[in-house]
Image (cartoon, rainbow, N blue to C red):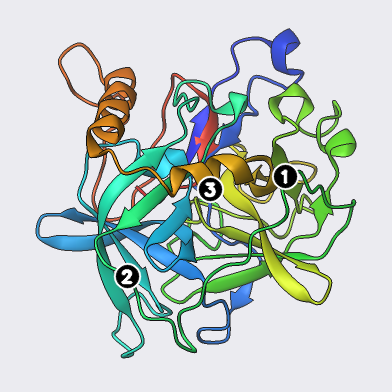
């Protein structure tokens, strides 16, 4: 899910009042991926009305741990992870569905200030998945690594294939070369909305993430192998594939220490306390969510924030 962040002033963000980030992205301008060619990609799904709905992507980083975006899981819902998925509408026999046992959201994540960063979370699965040719672990980058401008990367996901379009039923991929921080944070691109703990990719006006891609991986080719350098976070609210508004990802290499520490968390009460704190921030006085969750993969807009998240619900 990608979320819209409404800019309150022209001076603060350097954009027109009509331009703000959106966090509900899907792959735009891409093609169907070869079946199970990205075996670390998972579909994060939520339960509603007795049915499971795709909402975000994610990356399998251990047999019982998944990395995704914080905005995908900062709601009190029942989630499951499907590994080995390709077509959301049919069972190919390669899928492994596992319930989520625990959610570890980055402690600095603030759903009302997406531009601050920290849009990353870890999901501990109720059981380990079986690794095979359809399900593999994603390779994470060394801590602190920053890619050069125009490094070759691919975004993958089941998000919308065009702005306000439908979710893809089969996994899509699109080539998104990186845009370095100096360029992406310039006034003609994202300006100060983008932080150095983020990665920008794309921005050609034809290829991008879109709603439903949130939490999914940015695969970048380094030394002959694909490494997960980004977690899909947000795009422009003007549209998913806006020129000079690259898709923005959480930079994984900025959080390696946190990821390694997070995977050793064993105190469920600590996690539940944090989730409760996150939920209290996102709920109104009557206990209702400010951004209602709608079944059927509808876009969620949060008027209290500045970006549009790319989750599907």
Mark closest to the chain's N terminus, 1 or 2: 2
| Crowd rating for badge 2 (residues with CA inside 10 Å; few <14, some 14–19, many 20+) | few
Q: Quadrant of residue 126?
A: bottom left
Q: Where is residue 173 in the image (x, y as percent from the top left)?
A: 62, 71
- So how many labels did they put on this image? 3
Which residue is tagged 3? 260
Relative to 19, residue 99 above or below:
below
**What residue is disc 2 on?**
128
Across and down, in percent, residue 261 comes to 50, 42
Q: Which residue shows up at 41% across the image and 73% down it?
A: 169
From the viewer's side, name the closer residue of 306 and 18.
306
The answer to whether mark 1 and mark 2 are in CB contact below 8 A is no
Density class for disc 1 (Cα within 10 Å; few <14, some 14-19, many ≥20) is many
For disc 1, the marked residue is: 199
C-alpha separation, residue under disc 3 versus residue under disc 1: 20 Å
Task: Report x, y in % for residue 238.
Answer: 62, 38
> Does dot 3 land on a helix, a strand or a loop?
helix
Q: In this view, does 304 lie above or below 32?
A: above
Q: Could you tell me which secondary element the residue under label 2 belongs to?
A: loop
Instruction: Nearest to the eye among marks 1 and 2: give it.
Output: 2
Instruction: State whether residue 242 appears in this view.
Output: no
- Can residue 208 be seen? yes
Image point (50%, 77%), residue name: 136
Secondary structure of residue under mark 1: strand
Please say if the residues under marks 3 and 1 sit with CB atoms less than 8 Å apart: no
Q: Please say if the residues under marks 3 and 2 sit with CB atoms less than 8 Å apart.
A: no
Earlier along the polypeptide chain: callout 3 or callout 1? 1
């Amino acid at each position: 899910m990608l979320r819209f962040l409404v800019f309150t002033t022209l001076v603060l963000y350097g954009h027109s009042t009509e331009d703000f980030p959106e966090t509900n992205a899907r792959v735009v301008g891409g093609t169907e991926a070869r079946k199970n060619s990205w075996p670390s990609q998972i579909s994060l799904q939520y339960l509603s009305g007795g049915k499971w709905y795709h909402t975000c992507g994610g990356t399998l980083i251990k047999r019982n741990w998944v990395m995704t975006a914080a905005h995908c899981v900062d709601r009190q819902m029942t989630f499951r992870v499907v590994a080995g998925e390709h077509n959301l509408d049919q069972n190919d026999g390669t899928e492994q569905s596992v319930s989520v046992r625990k959610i570890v959201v980055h402690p600095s994540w603030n759903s009302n200030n997406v531009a601050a960063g920290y849009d990353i979370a870890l999901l501990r699965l109720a059981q380990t998945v079986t690794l095979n040719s359809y399900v593999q672990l994603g390779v994470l980058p060394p801590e602190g690594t920053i890619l050069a401008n125009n490094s070759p990367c691919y975004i993958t996901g089941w998000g919308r294939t065009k702005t306000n379009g439908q979710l893809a039923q089969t996994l899509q991929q699109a080539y998104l070369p990186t845009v370095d921080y100096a360029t992406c944070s310039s006034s003609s691109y994202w300006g100060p909305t983008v932080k150095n703990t983020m990665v920008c990719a794309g921005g050609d006006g034809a290829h991008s993430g879109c709603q439903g891609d949130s939490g999914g991986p940015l695969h970048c080719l380094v030394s002959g192998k694909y490494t997960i350098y980004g977690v899909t976070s947000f795009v422009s609210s003007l549209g998913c594939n806006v020129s000079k508004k690259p898709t923005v990802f959480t930079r994984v290499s900025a959080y390696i220490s946190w990821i390694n520490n997070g995977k050793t968390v064993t105190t469920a009460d600590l996690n539940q306390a944090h989730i409760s704190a996150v939920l209290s921030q996102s709920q109104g006085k009557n206990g209702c969510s400010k951004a209602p969750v709608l079944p059927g993969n509808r876009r969620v807009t949060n008027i209290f924030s500045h970006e549009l998240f790319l989750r599907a619900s």
